[in-house]
Amino acid sequence: MAEKIKVLVVDDSALVRKLLTEILADHPEIEVVGVAQDPFIARDKIKQLNPDVLTLDVEMPRMDGLTFLRNLMRLRPMPVVMISSLTERGADVTLQALESGAIDFVTKPKIGLGEGMDEYKEEIVAKIKVAAGAANRVKALKGLSELDVAPKLSADAVLGQRKPKHYQTTDKIIAIGASTGGTEAIKDVLVNLPPDMPGIVIAQHIPAGFSKAFAQRMDKMSALTVFEAEDGQQILPGHVYIAPGDAHLLMVRDGAKYRCQLSDGPAVNRHKPSVDVLFRSVAQHAGPNASGTILTGMGDDGAKGLLEMKQAGAITLAQDEKTSVVWGMPGEAVKAGGVDEILPLNKVAMRLVELASRG
């Protein structure tokens, strides 16, 4: 019998500690070995209990979660999943935590903590398993478990399949999709791109409230102008458009121009925004004028859409397994036959520049 994943829960809220312990203890592959209400107690319990994964609150007394995380990664690196609040400060600190080495994050519901956390069971368990690098994680990577109740819809639920007859512009477009580990992977790509790149559209699995903070952070860090995408916004060279955390982002053609279109359609592959939806729209409206890149992520969202882009004449890239936090989405895209080139993360930006400069 495989050893259970040992988890230490660190949160200043007694209710959150109780709820997380109950959720995780209910899973046969996970054991909660301890809880701590602040980083100082957590430090001692890490030494005593040697957990495999830490869940860490963003805001805590005596020492905030970000400071503790940075100390932890310097002195005793280990997998950490942040437990974050949907606030402006919570979003900013969480993004900093991902930069500092956290694997992923789970958001606390704003109201009805008990009922809300219960709805997050599947997400919490999956992210703990991914963080631990559990050997038997097929269900986690596919976003499936015995707790699933919602149907898994395809991009057909938002955007029908069709083939464009011609393209009214030769302007290039870059489409990028990512999930777990994606905020950092996207940052690594964007900060290494020059300001004269074609327009870039991005679907990252991220909650509403975090996408705007993420876009603002990328705008400060890169030479490109980065927005949280708005409906009807024209897609311009040197600009990046990141899907809002509660809407699908589509790229549509308006004469010789490209525009962003937001859709409030149902979740696709249980995600909204969905990478498949974005990639399909780019395949339909840009065809061979586009390039598509799928980065680290849990599940298989984007695999079919990237194949559609390739079939429409786009050049398609996937992050390699070695540099991915989770090789779920890129791996599924490779299996589906939708990938032209598999690259380490540090080579992706350079390749996108080469593709953009082709005639």
Image (tube, rainbow, N blue to C red):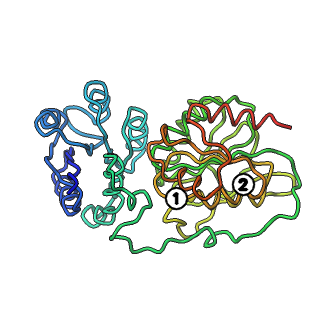
In this view of the protein, which residue sits in the foreground, 201 or 330? 330
Residue toward you, 223 or 35: 35
Which secondary structure lies at badge 1? loop
**Quarter occupied by residue 312:** bottom right
Place of residue 247 in the rendered image (x, y in percent of width and height, measured from the top left): 56, 60
Three-letter code, disc 2 = Lys
Which residue: 67% across, 31% down?
350
Whichever of callouts 2 and 1 sits on the residue coming sooner in the sequence is 1
Give coordinates of residue 43: x percent, y percent.
17, 33
- Measuring from the top left, give residue 167's x and y in whole percent: 87, 56
Asked whether 204 or 262 is in front, the reply is 204
Residue 29 located left or right of residue 347: left
Left or right: 246 in relation to 10: right
Going by the picture, which residue comes out furthest to the front? Answer: 1
* Residue picked out by circle 1: 300
Q: Quadrant of the N terminus?
A: bottom left
Q: Name the residue under label 2.
A: 310
Q: Is residue 356 left or right of residue 318?
A: right
326 w.r.t. 359: above or below: below
**Residue 172 appears left or right of 244:** right
Measuring from the top left, give residue 92's x and y in whole percent.
43, 39
Measure the alpha-carbon separation of dots 2 and 1: 17 Å
Q: Is mark 2 on a helix, strand or loop?
A: helix
Query: Residue type at mark 1?
Result: Asp
